[in-house]
Image (cartoon, rainbow, N blue to C red):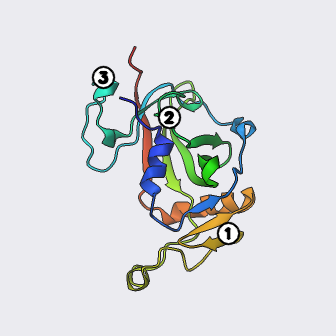
């Protein structure tokens, strides 16, 4: 069974959340991948809460809630997803930035990725990921009363666009990515599970 790569699964989880930074054109190109640490090749997972599965099972038997994908040293393996207009790119930085979106839709969203574990060869084996947000989420009472999803404290360099915000340059994006860690108490964890099926 073909599954979405981790970054696209995260993009799906973000859908409809609001308060998310996006750009109308990609801010990063393939050249920006240089300097990204290698990922440990094999099968990775980004399990959803309460997802109980046995990673020793054949990959085809993993449940969809595991959000599993084959990875090579550069990230999700090409061909491990169903044909889609979505694209992704992991760009070097601190944190790493995952750019995902579709050129024909003129929307690219961004996720921060922080390596948290490495193997003996310094390949990434675990990482935390969080969405790049426009600012701290609106207070719960205000959000409920007004159905507001966009922050009340828009970060510098971002432009409000409905429930989300538009970014046009890397500096503003990176600043928002770093600040967003504090606004995402429940990060999503991706981790290497085992060698791939042969």
Query: Marks 3 and 1, Cα distance to the nearest angstrom?
Result: 44 Å
Q: SS class of the residue under badge 2?
A: loop
Mark identifier at residue 190: none
Residue placed at 32% from the left, 26% from the top?
60
Name the image quarter holding the C terminus.
top left
Mark identifier at residue 58: 3
Mark earlier in primary sequence (2, 3)? 3
Mark identifier at residue 158: 1
Query: Marks 1 and 2, Cα distance to the nearest angstrom?
Result: 32 Å
Residue placed at 57% from the left, 51% from the top?
112
Relative height, residue 48 to residue 193 (above, below): below
Quadrant hosting residue 133: bottom right
Mark earlier in primary sequence (1, 2)? 2
Label 1 crowd (10 A; few <14 / some 14-19 / many >=20): many
Coordinates of residue 1 in the picture (x, y in percent)? 35, 29
Mark earlier in primary sequence (3, 1)? 3
- Residue 88: in sight, yes or no? yes
Residue holding disc 2: 83
Q: Nearer the viewer, mark 1 or mark 2?
A: 2
Q: Nearer the viewer, mark 2 or mark 3?
A: 2
Coordinates of residue 9 in the picture (x, y in percent)? 44, 45
- Residue 127: in sight, yes or no? no
């Amino acid at each position: 069974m073909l599954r979405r790569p981790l970054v696209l699964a995260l993009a799906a989880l973000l859908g409809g959340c609001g308060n998310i930074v996006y750009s109308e054109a990609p801010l990063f190109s393939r050249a920006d991948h240089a300097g990204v640490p290698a990922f440990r090749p094999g099968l990775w997972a980004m399990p959803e809460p309460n997802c109980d599965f046995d990673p020793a099972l054949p990959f085809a038997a993993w449940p969809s809630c595991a959000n599993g994908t084959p990875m090579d040293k550069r990230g999700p393996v090409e061909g491990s997803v169903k044909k889609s207009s979505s694209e992704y790119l992991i760009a070097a930085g601190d944190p790493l930035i995952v750019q995902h979106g579709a050129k024909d839709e003129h929307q690219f969203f961004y996720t921060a990725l922080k390596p948290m574990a490495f193997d003996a060869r310094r390949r990434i084996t675990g990482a935390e990921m969080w969405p790049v947000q426009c600012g701290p989420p609106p207070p719960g009472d205000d959000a409920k009363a007004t159905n507001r999803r966009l922050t009340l404290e828009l970060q510098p360099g971002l432009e409000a666009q409905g429930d989300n915000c538009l970014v046009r340059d890397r500096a503003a994006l990176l600043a928002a990515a770093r600040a967003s860690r504090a606004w995402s108490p429940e990060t999503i964890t991706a981790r290497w599970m085992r060698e791939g099926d042969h």
